[in-house]
Image (tube, rainbow, N blue to C red):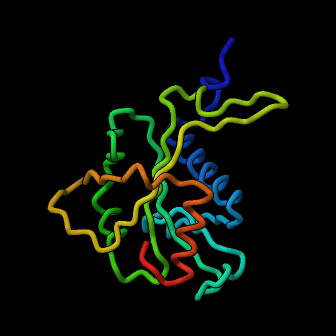
Amino acid sequence: MESWVSSSPMHTSTRKEEFSYAYVHAIASTAGFCVQPKSRPMDSAGLDIIIEAPGAMTKGVLSFPKIEAQVKCTATKANITELFIKFPLEVKNYNKLRLTSHLVPQILIVVLVPEILENWIEITEPESTVIRKCAYWLSLKGKEETLNDETITVSIPRSNLLTPESLTELMSKVAHRQDL
């Protein structure tokens, strides 16, 4: 009998993309924020989602703070060091995210998943749903130019773990017009 993994016509890279959006959506929803996919032209411009507060944050300067994000997903174990997640990013995306002229702050979010697709999610009825592994974020605003042609490896501090708490802190910074 064919497993549910092999019976789906969806390519693994598409599954990673969809899973990563769902992962970020789960984090944002838990923190009380909205997530919207960007339009296809904006996806082509290197932005996948927008995360925004559905109102003013407590004692914030700006109402409805928002962050735009490019979301990536990887199952490669070799990217993890003791202090950093090393992620190869296309230079064209790097160059867009490093600009300083964005009206809305932009970040890179990298979602890590297990190499074996069946391990991405575990549902134990009625006890729990476990989503594996985790996500990290990075602001590339103001980073240096690169001479690379295709990819540049960015180092995301492991302390930049994307959680409901860290996302709330990021949104608070945006509400106070602080850099991420």
Q: Position of residue 154 (x, y in %)?
A: 30, 54
158 or 1: which is nearer to us?
Answer: 158
Q: Residue at x 65, y 56 (%)?
A: 25
Residue 174 at x, y percent in the picture? 52, 78
x, y percentage for residue 55? Answer: 71, 80
> Residue 92 lies in what quarter of the image?
bottom left
Left or right position of 55 against 115: right
134 vs 157: above or below: above
Is 56 left, or right, of 161 in this rendering? Answer: right
179 lies above or below 29:
below
Query: Which residue ends up furthest to the front in the rendered image?
Result: 59
**Quadrant of the drawing holding the N terminus:** top right
Residue plotted at (43% across, 60% down): 108
Q: Viewer-proximal residue, 13 or 95?
A: 95
Identified at 37% across, 68% down, the residue is 97
The residue most toward the left is 147
Q: Residue furthest top?
A: 1
Looking at the image, which residue is at 43% across and 52% down?
Answer: 159
